[in-house]
Amino acid sequence: MLPADVPAVMAVQAACYGEHLLEPAGVLHDRLGAAADTCWVALRGDRVCAYLAAYRSRLGAVTALNGPFKPAPSPDTLYLHDLAVHPDAHGSGVGGRLVDGLVALARREGLRWSALVAVQGATSFWRRHGYETHAPAQPDRLDAYGDDARYMVRPLAA
């Protein structure tokens, strides 16, 4: 993902999330500054059809909604903060390919876990990708994500 992609990413976000989950462009720009190598987009033709924003963290940590990415000095976890696939690209497998690509990167770096907060009933999607519900270190941070928010973890060890 590049700074020039942010308007298209914001359009994908708006097509996918309820208003309470929309995060401002400034937050995304800040996240790119903190973790550009783990913020990716997928293109369909020359148009952004999906994105995944992630960073290196610690198991149990939950990024606050609208909060900054704070990469851990000694990470053990790839935290997937936001995956969104435009409705026009649903069923194409692009979301899974973004996840697989970043998980492969995390494994090469020796990270032991991947974690995320599932929203809007997406726990079944994440279970298909090896994630299971887990207790976060900061359960109060889940409140802003909605009643159905679940912290989920996937082991990355071979």
Image (cartoon, helix red, strand yellow):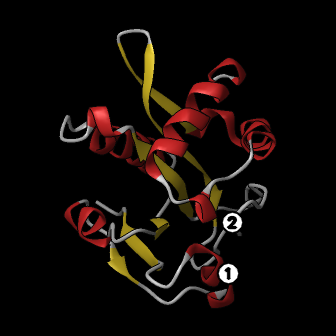
Residue 26 appears in the figure? yes
Estimate the x, y position of residue 100 in percent, counting from the top left: 32, 44
Q: Are marks 2 and 1 in contact (CB under 8 Å)?
A: yes
Q: Amino acid at mark 1?
A: Arg
Q: Is residue 47 left or right of residue 95?
A: right
Left or right for 117, reference 143: left
Q: Please determine whether, in this image, residue 114 is positioned above or below residue 102.
A: below
**Of the image marks 2 and 1, the number of the one nearer the N terminus:** 2
* Residue 94 in view: no
Left or right of 138 in this view: 147: left
Nearer to the camera, 87 or 43: 87
Residue under the image location 67 percent in, 89 percent down: 140
Badge 2 density bin: few <14, some 14–19, many ≥20, Cα 10 Å: some
Q: Position of residue 26 (x, y in %)?
A: 81, 41
Residue at image x 53%, y 44%?
A: 13
Residue name at image x 18 percent, y 41 percent = 91
Q: Secondary structure at mark 1?
A: helix
* Kind of residue at badge 2: Leu
* Residue 104 sits in quarter: top left
Where the C terminus falls, by quadrant? bottom left
Write down the residue under mark 2.
65
> Foreground: 69 or 107?
69
Please say if 66 is above or below 29: below
Q: Disc 1 marks which residue? A: 141
